[in-house]
Image (spheres, helix red, strand yellow):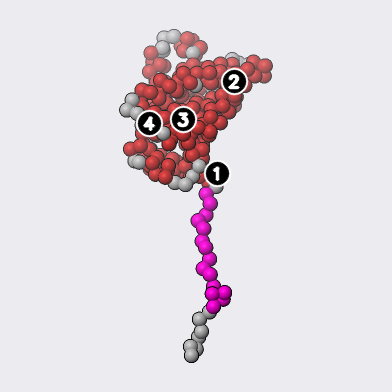
Amino acid sequence: MNEYPLNSPSEAVSEPIITPPQITFWGSVWSVVWKDITLEWRTRQLLSIMVMFAISVLVVFNFALETELDAVRNVATGLLWTTILLAATLGLNRTMTIEQENRSFTGVLLAPIDRSALYLGKVLSTLLFVVVLEAILILLFSVFFNKPFWRPGVWIILFMGSVGYVAAGVLVASMTIQTRAREVLLPVLLLPLSLPCVLAAATATALFMFPQLPMIEELQAPLSLVAAYDVMMVVAGLLTYRYVVEE
């Protein structure tokens, strides 16, 4: 007779079932943002390329139009936005190229996260780099052109315009990343798509270049257009990004 009888099935102790922790939506977004920030901190390729390109454009225009200083000041707002758009497009192209070269984007797609979280994470990380670029450009443009680019209203408009441009840019860059002519297709598709947002933002920025601050009525129309464009592009990206990356 056994000294220690076996337990009956009803008395057997069942092993606890361990389920993997659920990844929240915002946790996935933060993971994508942290990945991009860490990659940029290690390589220092994206932000340095954007800043050097923007400074080169600024210096070239400044010396080329040195004799027409008044004319340069009149077009300083357009020059600022042109520099931001070209540098941001270069940054978008570079960040997606790095993802493809390292196969990291494929690895992210294999992760069990929502594709809309991946899109929002890419938008936030790219927007962070663009905001750093804009902070540097505002300082340089204020010094070179002696215009009040440092005003808080200019910062707000630049941020609003950048949200729409980056939201559209991440969507377009993800479409063109698999093509051979991605360096050409990205600006060709993105610049016309973002034209309503950029024109309205540039118009609102120009209103702050006068000594007196603009009236609310003058800013209402361009800012409403920029805000509507931002919402439309972010919502479109959240709804369609899964189809973009899976095709």
Residue at 64% from the left image edge and 15% from the top image edge: 218
**Distance between mark 1 and mark 2 Cα atoms:** 28 Å
Between disc 4 and disc 3, whose residue precedes?
Answer: 3
In contact (CB < 8 Å): disc 3 and disc 1:
no
Residue 33, placed above or below residue 19: above
Judge the density around disc 2: few (<14), some (14-19), many (≥20) Cα neighbours within 10 Å: some
The answer to whether the residue labelled 2 contacts the one labelled 3, judged by CB atoms less than 8 Å apart, is: no
Tell me, for residue 26, which label it has, or none: 1
Number of marks drawn: 4
Q: Is residue 153 left or right of residue 242?
A: right
Q: Secondary structure at mark 3?
A: helix
Write down the residue under mark 4. Answer: 177
Q: Which residue is mark 3?
A: 171
Q: Nearer the viewer, residue 218 or 199?
A: 199
Q: Which residues are magenta?
A: 8-23
Q: Nearer the viewer, mark 3 or mark 1?
A: 3
Q: Residue at x 51, y 38 (%)?
A: 116
User: Judging from the image, what secondary structure is the residue with disc 2 in?
Assistant: helix
Rounded to the nearest angstrom, the CA distance separating label 2 from label 3 is 20 Å
Question: Which circle, 1 or 4, is nearer the viewer?
Answer: 4
Which mark lies nearer to you, 2 or 3? 3
Residue contact between numbered discs 4 and 3, judged by CB atoms under 8 Å:
no
210 on left or right of 78: right
Give the quarter of the image for residue 215: top right
Q: Nearer the viewer, residue 24 or 62?
A: 24
Name the residue tied to disc 2: 225
- Amino acid type of disc 3? Leu
Q: Earlier in the sequence, mark 2 or mark 3?
A: 3
Q: Earlier in the sequence, mark 2 or mark 4?
A: 4
